[in-house]
Amino acid sequence: MAEPAHQPVMVRQVVDWLAPRPGGLVVDATVGLGGHAAALLGACPGLRLLGLDVDPEALAAARERLAGFGERSELVQRSYWELAAVLEARGIEHVDGVLFDLGVSSLQLDSPQRGFSFRFEAPLDMRFSGGGVTAAELLADADEEELVRWLVEYGEEPRARRVARAIAQARRRATIATTTELRRIVTAALGGRHGKIDPATRTFQALRIATNRELEGIPLAVEAAARALVPGGRVAVISFHSLEDRLVKHALRRLSGRCVCPPGSFACQCRPESLVEVLTPHPARPDRDEERTNPRARSAKLRVAARRAS
Ligand SMILES: C[S@@+](CC[C@H](N)C(=O)[O-])C[C@H]1O[C@@H](n2cnc3c(N)ncnc32)[C@H](O)[C@@H]1O
């Protein structure tokens, strides 16, 4: 099988920040095609790695990629939402590091039949796990205000209302079932390409995030990771858009003992805890070379925190 064409981002920084040690255990909570996992295992001969992903196709590719590391890696089809339960079921009390590399992989984007990309004619599926509600079903059921919210929050689409209205009008005539139909509707609503990105890019991102409920589990998963760490152990999170990054920033800030309630709140509701120290007050970014050679890296931000001793 050909090497999967997913270039993991910020690999050197991830390995440096997680500083794997022989005999240690690292969780790759979004193992994907195993790029980061292979780098971590390769950097430290005695390291063991537990990899999670919800996508069976990604896990199959990771399994093949990590086969050479033998029993040092274990891969399971579970969501990082369930991180605490996955560790508990294995009797694992502490881990040395946890990595989250959020979002979508190139394997998913480049698989024509999975419906993540408007580059290919395909049913509007977009599910990471292959289970649950498809993007087409979601699009058929959501009310217009909800569509606007997704487009604004998940897609950062400046003309969200116009797109939502066009979708609502189109689906009254017929179900929007394929990638090309959705793209045609969005392009007609927004006009052709003005800047560098295709007019449908933001809508597709919003719909993918909504379909997989990508943002909901992040704060709890980051908290579960922080709780599982040994003193000095590290959690590293790579995110690709501002809403994701804000959730990560707030989760780590709260877990470092700082209040993240909205300004002007009457009383603190967020219950800060002094579990970790944030090591990246500003997120780490890919270097120029990586930005040049890997377009996915351009929006990447890496935040890292270390578990406090007590
Ligand atoms: C950016 S890719 C990770 C790539 C990986 N770091 C590599 O080097 O190949 C993100 C992965 O997270 C997975 N994913 C998305 N939501 C998840 C969840 N709730 N739990 C576990 N994995 C998830 C996706 O299926 C995808 O494979």
Image: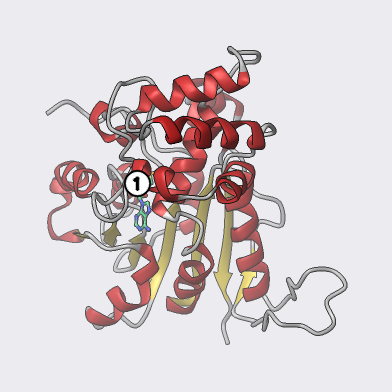
Outermost residue, bottom side: 310
Identify residue type, mark 1: Glu
Residue 51: x and y in percent read: 28, 58
Q: Is residue 155 above or below residue 85?
A: above
Q: Nearer the viewer, residue 220 or 154?
A: 154
Which image quadrant for residue 258? bottom right
Residue at (46, 68) in percent of width and height: 221
Place of residue 143 in the rendered image (x, y in percent of width and height, measured from the top left) = 52, 50
Direction from residue 19 to residue 136 in the image, left or right = left
| Res. 198 visible in picture | no
Residue at the spot 52% in from the left edge and 28% down from the top edge: 201
Residues packed near mark 1 inside 10 Å, few (<14), some (14 to 19) or many (20 plus):
some
The secondary element bearing badge 1 is classed as helix
Q: In the picture, which quadrant includes the C terminus? A: bottom right
Q: Residue furthest front?
A: 173
Q: Is residue 221 above or below residue 293?
A: below
The one nearer the camera, 241 or 1, is: 241
**Residue under label 1:** 137
Left/right placement of residue 198 relative to residue 123 reads right
Q: Is residue 65 left or right of residue 180?
A: left
Q: Position of residue 305 (x, y in %)?
A: 58, 65
Q: Nearer the viewer, residue 308 or 46?
A: 308
Q: Please name the residue shown 32% across and 54% down the image.
A: 44
Residue sitting at x 65%, y 49%:
283
Residue 250 visible at all: yes
Question: Residue 59, position in %: x, y?
Answer: 21, 49
